[in-house]
Amino acid sequence: MRVLLWALVCLTVMPAGAQTTFFSETFDGAVAPAMPGSVISADASWTTSDASSSPGSGLNNGVHTGSSPGNMVLGPIDLSAALDATLSYWARRTSSYSADSLFVRAGTDGATFESLLFGGGLPTSASTWEEILVTIPSELLGAESVYLRFEGRGGSSSGSNVRVDDIRIEGTADPSAMETGFGFEAALDTPLPSPE
């Protein structure tokens, strides 16, 4: 009887979600102007720089410079356990780089980016850092590999630039969809050995 009751309880209890950081890039792990490893491709107009530190991690940030468009692609990001998620990043622009000239798109193959997360994702005021927050659409939740593409449309002069820093995806994770949790192996439900 106890086994039957326990089975019924297990079937009716939904796993509680846990707040998780699914992705974080501060650009501080690379020596400027090189890009860090999570940037899988970048147009030559995207580099890193420490010329204007953000209120977040400071140090380096990703910079798109000039009047020509250029893309920066980050990933892959594992959202297979995500119940919900929010993309956040710090951004700053020069007055010659329009506030509607940065688009953020997402896709699952690293080549096509069907989901527009933000069109015009820059601060309304020039020369000030602002944190931008965007909800990740439901069609990307549960995907094992998500890629972000930051599309800099370019400014009105060669010195125009936009800076982004501390790109993060945070949200609620489903522990039952994660490989391990709370010190137990999900497949075996046995305690993991303690580190020596």
Image (cartoon, grey):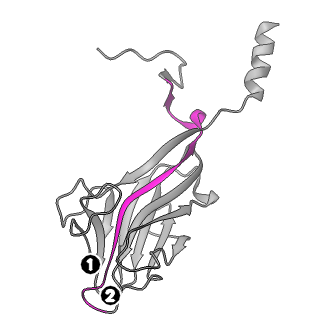
Residue 68 - label: 2
Q: Residue at x 50, y 42 (%)?
A: 20
Q: Is residue 167 above or below residue 173?
A: below
Q: Where residue 61 appears, x then y in whole percent? A: 29, 64
In this view, which residue lies farthest toward the top?
A: 1
CA distance separating discs 2 and 1:
8 Å
Q: Residue at x 46, y 46 (%)?
A: 21
In the shown orientation, is residue 168 left or right of residue 65? right
Q: Is residue 165 above or below residue 183?
A: below
Q: Is residue 20 above or below residue 105?
A: above
The residue that disc 1 covers is 45
Q: Where residue 159 appears, x then y in whole percent? A: 25, 86
Which of disc 1 and disc 2 is earlier in sequence? 1
Q: Regarding mark 1 in the picture, which secondary structure is present there?
A: loop
Q: Is residue 110 visible?
A: no
In the shown orientation, is residue 174 left or right of residue 22? right
Q: Where residue 34 appears, x then y in whole percent? A: 20, 64
Tags 2 and 1 in contact by the CB under 8 Å rule? yes
Q: Which residues are magenta?
A: 157-182
Magenta segment: does it hold 42?
no
In this view, which residue lies farthest toward the bottom?
A: 156
Q: Which amino acid, by three-letter code, is at mark 2?
A: Ser
